[in-house]
Image (tube, helix red, strand yellow):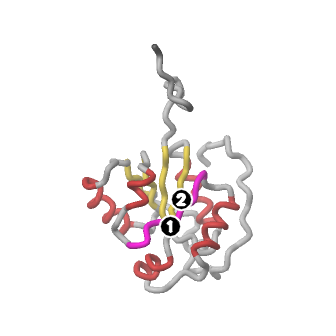
Amino acid sequence: MKFAIPGYNRDVPKQKTVLVFGTFDGLHPGHEHFLKRARKYGDRLVVAVGQDAAVQALKGHPPQNTLAVRIAALRASGLADRVIPADRFLGTWRSVARIRPDVIVLGYDQKFLGRALRQALPALPCQPKIISLRSAHHPGQYHSSLLGKRIHAPRPHTCPASRTVP
């Protein structure tokens, strides 16, 4: 007797999940560049958007836009397959435990996050590869701290099947 698991096909390879973290307070071309680069490390991109209290604790000031507005802008952009609120408190790593990514991609300015994550990794239920991007798309021009932080009109992601490196 054969047993079938609905929705499971062992001939289909497991999708590689990439997780990124960020505040995304005013979506700009630098964010777009970061998300497109992160997507190249897997098949599915999940974005964990920083909760207001965590952003306040990390940056010393609250985000200009609410969590709901920042999540809506990312979802509307089409740059991610899934957008979730990140952990409410720093250092709990519940997002990582819940998503169980294969890869976590960090931005050029997330060195503190990288150190904390690497320390916490042995206690986590998964062991994702951590990739730190070393460069940014015009960091002197496109950084949320330099821009007015109102949400920019999202650009639709025009070619979801294309993942070529620029």
Residue 47 image label: 2
Residue most extreme to the bottom:
61
Q: Which of pointers 2 and 1 lies earlier in the amino acid sequence?
A: 1
Circle 1 — which element?
strand
> Is 110 placed above or below 161 here?
below
Q: Position of residue 47 (x, y in %)?
A: 53, 59
Instruction: Indicate yes or no whether the magenta region holds residue 109.
Output: no
Identify which residue is drawn at 43% across, 76% down.
Answer: 54
Residue 22 image label: 1
Identify which residue is drawn at 55% across, 30% down.
Answer: 6
Residue most extreme to the top:
1
Few, some or many C-alpha atoms within 10 Å of disc 2 (few <14, some 14-19, many ≥20)?
many
- C-beta proximity under 8 Å, tags 2 and 1: yes
Q: Position of residue 52 (x, y in %)?
A: 50, 78
Query: What span is colored magenta in the figure?
Result: 81-89
Q: Position of residue 70 (x, y in %)?
A: 61, 71
